[in-house]
Amino acid sequence: MELIIKLLVNAVAVFVFGYMLKGVEVKGFGTAVWVAILLALVNAFVRPVVLFLTIPFTIITFGLFILVVNTLMVMLVDWIVDGLQIKNFWWALLFSVLMSLVNVLFF
């Protein structure tokens, strides 16, 4: 039940940020749910591998490279989901930071 609540909160956040940010478009709430599910899957399976491979960059940048990794995960989900459109890297960065803030505040 807790997983479903987390996914729904993230879906609502995706949907709201889709309307708030000019560079992020979400077609509907169903798309937001798929984005939340795919973000969870990507963060569970792909992100750890990418973080491991980029340890030297993370150390050199004192951890700031993790923001780039998070942004790339959002861009990967954007590439997979047809109903999500993020204009460029900077909008994806802002979107990923806001999604991270939502997760820190609620969970």
Image: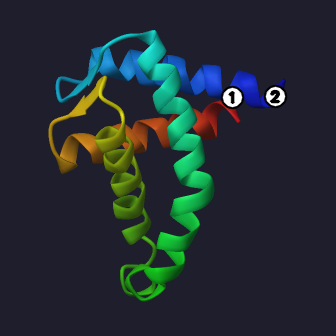
Q: Is residue 94 visible?
A: no
Query: Which residue in the protein does label 1 denote?
Result: 6
Q: Amino acid at mark 2?
A: Glu
Query: Which residue in the protein does label 2 denote?
Result: 2
User: Which disc number belongs to residue 88?
Assistant: none
Q: Amino acid at mark 1?
A: Lys
Q: Please, is residue 66 above or below residue 75 in the view?
A: below
Residue at horizontal 34 percent and vertical 37 percent from the top? 95
Q: Residues within 10 Å of mark 2 (few under 14, many from 20)?
A: few
Instruction: Give the image location of residue 76, x and y in percent.
Output: 35, 49
Instruction: Give the image location of residue 70, x and y in percent.
Output: 42, 55
Residue at horizontal 47 percent and vertical 71 percent from the top? 50
Q: Please, is residue 67 above or below residue 37 in the view?
A: below
In this rendering, would 84 be left or right of 34? Answer: left
Q: Nearer the viewer, residue 104 or 4?
A: 4
Q: Is residue 81 visible?
A: yes
| Label 1: which secondary element | helix
Quadrant for residue 103, please give it.
top right
Instruction: Give the image location of residue 56, x and y in percent.
Output: 43, 89
Query: Do tag 2 and tag 1 residues touch (Cβ < 8 Å)?
Result: yes
Q: Residues within 10 Å of mark 1 (few under 14, many from 20)?
A: some
